[in-house]
């Protein structure tokens, strides 16, 4: 796949995840007594973690296909790391926190910083995996 198409695909996946994450937040998470600043952080975290879930799933399928072709131990290790990233993304999603009875509060921007780095790493891995 060309670099331009790979970049467009990654941006599209990120945008779709962001839209889905914001929709989930608007429907289920916001309006339960949080202040506006907390709501903004919940929106951003939900958008990032939903994007990370989508990126992780695509990476799992990409590296699984590559592992079937190559059978390399390194590819298997990346595949295991992608499952770990998927587990991280799912368990750090604000919707899961709400289902378990917890809410995001008091951490400010520090609640989203790890997800920014995870999104960056997943985007780079997907870009390399699509070449």
Image: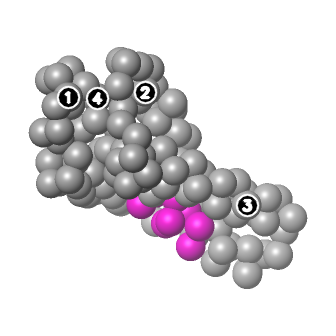
Label 4, secondary structure: give it.
Answer: helix
Structural crowding at the residue carrying mark 4, measured as other residues with C-alpha within 10 Å and reported as few (<14), some (14–19) or many (≥20): some
Q: Residue at x 20, y 28 (%)?
A: 34
- Contact, CB < 8 Å: mark 4 with mark 2? yes
Image point 70% across, 63% down: which residue? Answer: 79
Label 2 sits on residue: 111
Of residues 14 and 38, the one drawn nearer to the viewer in this rendering: 38
Which percent across, then down, holds residue 31? 12, 39
Q: Nearer the viewer, mark 2 or mark 1?
A: 1
Which circle's residue, 3 or 1, is located before the other in the chain? Answer: 1
Label 1: which secondary element: loop
What is the C-alpha distance between the residues marked 1 and 4? 11 Å
Q: CA distance from mark 4 to mark 2?
A: 8 Å
Give the main secondary structure, helix, strand or loop, of the magenta stretch: helix
Image position of 18 with respect to 115: above or below:
below
Secondary element under disc 2, as helix, strand or loop, is helix
In the orientation shown, which residue stands out farthest toward the bottom?
Answer: 68
Name the residue rendered at 30%, 54% in the picture. Answer: 17
- First in sequence: mark 2 or mark 1? 1
Could you give the CA–CA distance between mark 3 and mark 1, rounded to whole angstroms? 37 Å
Q: Tag on residue 34?
A: 1
Q: Which residues are magenta?
A: 54-61
Give the mark nearest the N terminus, 3 or 4: 4
Estimate the spatial distance between the alpha carbons at disc 2 and disc 3, rounded to whole Å. Answer: 25 Å
Mark whose residue sits in front, 3 or 4 = 4
User: x, y percentage for residue 131?
Assistant: 55, 60
Q: Residues within 10 Å of mark 3 (few under 14, many from 20)?
A: some
Q: Is the residue marked by circle 2 packed among few (<14), some (14-19), or many (20+) residues within 10 Å?
A: some
Describe residue 65's horizontal placement relative to residue 68 as left or right. left
- Determine the CA span between mark 2 and mark 1: 15 Å
Q: Is residue 72 rendered to the left or right of residue 32?
A: right
Pointer 4: what residue? 41
């Amino acid at each position: 796949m060309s670099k331009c198409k790979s970049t467009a695909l990654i941006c599209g996946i990120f945008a779709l995840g962001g839209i889905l994450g914001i929709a989930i937040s608007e429907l289920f998470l916001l309006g339960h007594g949080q202040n506006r600043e907390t709501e903004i952080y919940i929106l951003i975290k939900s958008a990032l973690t939903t994007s990370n879930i989508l990126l992780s799933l695509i990476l799992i399928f990409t590296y699984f296909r590559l592992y079937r072709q190559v059978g390399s131990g390194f590819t298997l290790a990346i595949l295991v790391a992608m499952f770990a990233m998927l587990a991280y993304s799912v368990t750090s999603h604000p919707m899961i926190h709400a289902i378990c009875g917890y809410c995001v509060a008091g951490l400010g921007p520090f609640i989203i910083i790890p997800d920014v780095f995870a999104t960056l790493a997943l985007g780079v891995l997907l870009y390399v995996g699509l070449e």
